[in-house]
Image: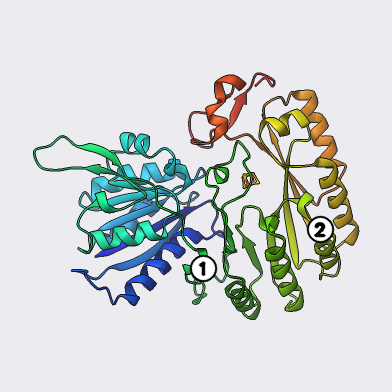
Amino acid sequence: MKILLAAVNAKYIHSNLAVYSLKAYAEKSLAQSDCGGLNVKPDITIAEYTINQQEDEILRDIFQGKPDILCLSCYIWNLTCVENIVREIHKVLPDTHIWLGGPEVSYDARAVLGRLPEVDGIMMGEGEKTFLELVRFYCGGTESLAQIKGIAWRERSAGKEERIRENPWREVMDLSEIPFVYEDMEGFEHKIIYYESSRGCPFSCSYCLSSVDKCLRFRDLELVKRELQFFIDQRVPQVKFVDRTFNCRHDHAMTVWRYIQEHDNGITNFHFEISADLLREEELELMRQMRPGLIQLEIGVQSTNPQTIREIRRTMKFEEVGRIVKRINSFGNIHQHLDLIAGLPYENYDSFKASFDDVYKLEPEQLQLGFLKVLKGSYMEERKEDYGLVYKGRPLYEVLYTKWLSY
Ligand code: SF4
């Protein structure tokens, strides 16, 4: 049974951690049971493409592999491309079962199945266990899709009208159960390495899908240290932590930062998304001693308008963020990247200018200005009428105007 996990990344240098994680988890679990109960052996492969590639090139590549099952990972930046692939690939591989997963389809599964009749089902939420069960299903080990948690699927039975069914969501898993995906570095030589030491976010920002799943989990720190040592030994140029708020647990962050400081190879750079106002003196003192370029920090400010911050349910004390960013700046060894979002509730042109000035004054190495994206399933989307939010109808769903800010 040929199963292809395909990812369409934004850039060639990116890699898709999700598909590697699904493959590693399924293969490890199947090996432990010696593929017990399966009628056919699964052959799981990965293909990575980019949105800048010609769609025909991607179609040809998938077609040549002739997978029995094709699973595609969906994000806001690739959904249009994935939908085009799905529509066309079904014409040339009509017997291939097509499954989608990822944040861009998880909270909107019925609508996606409604508009893409080529798709058999959607994996909703985290995918490792769900994918494993799908593999078992297609290889004869599970009797019915109705038994698999975390999927929405198209039920087709002879003589009956087709219907879309949605099974209950799955309980979240222990992050330490996922195998390390980089044992074999072949193919990652010129890529950014993405690494996950925690999943979920304790905060509730209204525009963000990470706030929907409140189950914050951490990978065992002994495992994390071993895996970081692997990257250090391999002298990889950059490791980006995908943890949503890396420093939300002080002892976890401190252990990782201390480890990379003590085992620095003089080359590898580690990137973290953090909440600056959660940093403590102990962490700042450690950062002060780091090699220039050992770590870089991405810090979401989004707005400095207190009414906006309250309304988007963001937990941030800007005075504290400002104090800490300036302090880190004074060390002269850490690149800071600060984010702002235009188009948030209560943010008019003048208050946005004030937000911009406030952040600019902090002199970060990089200031990223993005436009609000109204994501399906987010609380922001629920409040769109109240905010007079008008946004693009296709991904990236960027705001066009609001009650407070004209187009
Ligand atoms: S802190 Fe970041 S990841 Fe967490 S809910 Fe807010 S925007 Fe999302």
Q: Look at the numbered disc 1 and give the secondary structure of its residue.
A: helix
Q: Residue at x 12, y 37 (%)?
A: 160
Q: Amino acid at mark 1?
A: Ser
Instruction: Count residues near mark 1 (Cα–Cα under 10 Å), then give few for <14, some for 14-19, many for 20+.
Output: some
Within 10 Å of disc 2 (Cα), the crowding (few <14, some 14-19, many 20+) is few
In this figure, which colouring scheme has been used for the structure?
Answer: rainbow
Residue 141 placement (x, y as % from top left): 22, 64
**Residue nearest the observer in this picture, 36 or 108:** 36
How far is disc 1 from disc 2 in space, using C-alphas?
A: 27 Å
Q: Amino acid at mark 2?
A: Arg
Residue depicted at x 66% and y 70%: 237
Using residue 188 as the reference point, say whether residue 289 is left or right of it. Answer: right
Question: Residue 250: percent from the left, percent from the top?
Answer: 72, 61
Which secondary structure, mark 2? loop
The residue that mark 1 highlights is: 176
> x, y percentage for residue 81?
43, 44
Viewer-side residue, 340 vs 172: 172
**Figure check: 37 above or below 80:** below
Q: In the figure, is residue 184 to the left or right of 36?
A: right
Quarter-wise, where is residue 197 in the image?
Answer: bottom right
The CB of the residue at mark 1 lies under 8 Å from ligand 1: no
Q: Residue furthest right?
A: 330
Q: Which residue is mark 2?
A: 280
